[in-house]
Image (cartoon, helix red, strand yellow):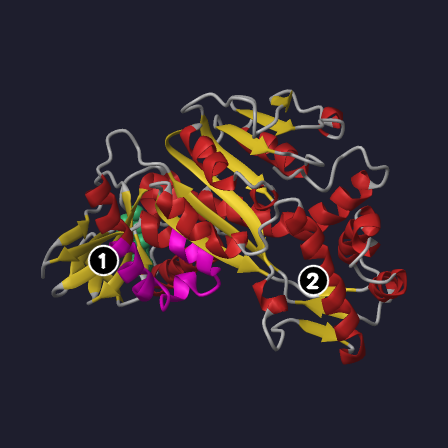
Amino acid sequence: MGSYVFDNAWEKERERLSALERYFDPGTIRVLDSIGIDRGWSCLEVAGGGGSIARWLSHQVGKEGRVVATDIDTRFLEALTEPNLQVLRHDIITDELPEESFDLIHARLLLEHLPSRGVLLKKLVSALRPGGWIVVEDLDWGPLFAKPSLGFVHPASIQKTSERVARRLVAVMEAAGYDAAYGRRLPGELLECGLVDVNAEARDRLMWGGSAEAGMRRWTLERVRPAMTAKGGISTRALNQELANLANPNNAWRGLLLVAAWGRRLGKAESRTFKSRLVSEAHAILDHLRIVPLFADCSPVELETIASAVREIPAKEGAALTKEGAEGSSFFIIGRGTATVTRKEKHLAQLGPGSFFGEVALLTEGVRTATVTADGPMTLYELDANGFRDLMRRTPAVAQKVIQGLARRLQRADEEIAVEGEPFEYPRYF
Ligand code: CMP
């Protein structure tokens, strides 16, 4: 049985954790955001360490929600004051977890250290409510250890020392049960647990010497210095050299991947075959959405989220896709074909592939401002009102384009009114 190498009692552990949070938090938050943490959710942050993610989660879930942040040593978590955040001294290996209790569970840089990681992952999954999400993040040292190395070290003259030190660091951690390839295996592990909507991304950023991020590596090496230089290890000289390299702002490194993998426990009323059909459909839809200008500035993760929320629907020639004055509950993006927009039987516009419509009734929570009719057979991507609201909230790049589109329609409406010499009147959607 191994033991966790980085215990919180070490005097510099707070600094090490702060540097680590600075380096990894932006990516973690992006992934969690793309899943969409709703107000009222119940979240578990396992081995919360410095507590930055637990704090962020507690703000997302609001006062209707709750966050439980655990650690074997809660000294840093105790400093968190959020009222909906509960700090729990808890050992994931030996202590129990309540079943079916959380909407979201997150564990970063934890399971890779624990030899019983397979069992522990299953334990975490059973603590998820049906329909709940788990996000696990662990490292993949593969690129650094490939021959030749797929990492990047600048200048090349410090590469050898850097690689030797990295290898020794991993060897020290492996002696305590560490798995340096766990990150790479995470998606497979989540699938093994029977999760659906499994996906993953790997993150790697250039790390400059002397930066807060390089501090993370420096503190880590300091932390395990005795084990690094013990018999069979590397020389104190090589270690000191690497520490000096890490403090030098002219040096840079890349090549260590943090893999974030996530998946969802099947909901109670959901059947697996239906869900897997939906997942493959989402992949096909993704290929279409990639080329839609509305989504041009979306990240791959954002696009995937959108693809799994939209429904592909066919429409026949003459089909009324929206009816002026009627209630509306969907937003549409045109995949194939064209549609004509009319108001009071007056032609307003013709919309083609990549265009969207139906946003006005959803934004105003009012009625349709125009009738949109299919000119011929069409393929549409439909988002329901909740999906549209989520899209606007989570993807500012899309929200901006929807607003631009609206402004153009308003401008055009103004011009038409002026041309006709009618008394000025805002279109009905304002
Ligand atoms: P909504 O009112 O929900 O339903 C009808 C849709 O037609 C409307 O949202 C807009 O998306 C679209 N629409 C309204 N006016 C115009 C216009 N002048 N040009 C293009 N599209 C429009």
**Closer to us: 91 or 269:** 91
| Residue at the disc numbered 1 | 380
**Predominant SS of the magenta segment:** helix
The reply to whether the magenta stretch includes residue 285 is yes
Q: Position of residue 344 (x, y in %)?
A: 20, 52
Per the image, label 2 sits on a secondary structure element best described as helix
**Closer to us: 172 or 290:** 172
Q: Is mark 1 within 8 Å of ligand 1?
A: no
Q: Quadrant of the C terminus?
A: top left
Q: Residue furthest front?
A: 231
Q: Which mark is residue 340?
A: none
Residue under the image location 21 percent in, 40 percent down: 326
| Residue at the disc numbered 2 | 167
Q: Categorize mark 1 by other alpha carbons within 10 Å: few (<14), some (14-19), many (20+).
A: many
- If the picture is divided into quarters, which one holds ligand 1? bottom left
Mark 2 or mark 1: which comes first in sequence?
2
Q: Amino acid at mark 2?
A: Arg
The Cα atoms of the two marked residues, 2 and 1, are separated by 52 Å
Q: Is residue 88 left or right of residue 43?
A: right
The reply to whether the magenta stretch includes residue 371 is no
Residue under the image location 59 percent in, 43 percent down: 108
**Closer to us: 132 or 244:** 244
Q: Amino acid at mark 1?
A: Leu
Q: Position of residue 253 (x, y in %)?
A: 72, 68
Q: Position of residue 241 (x, y in %)?
A: 88, 66
Magenta segment: 280-305
Q: Quadrant of the N terminus?
A: top right
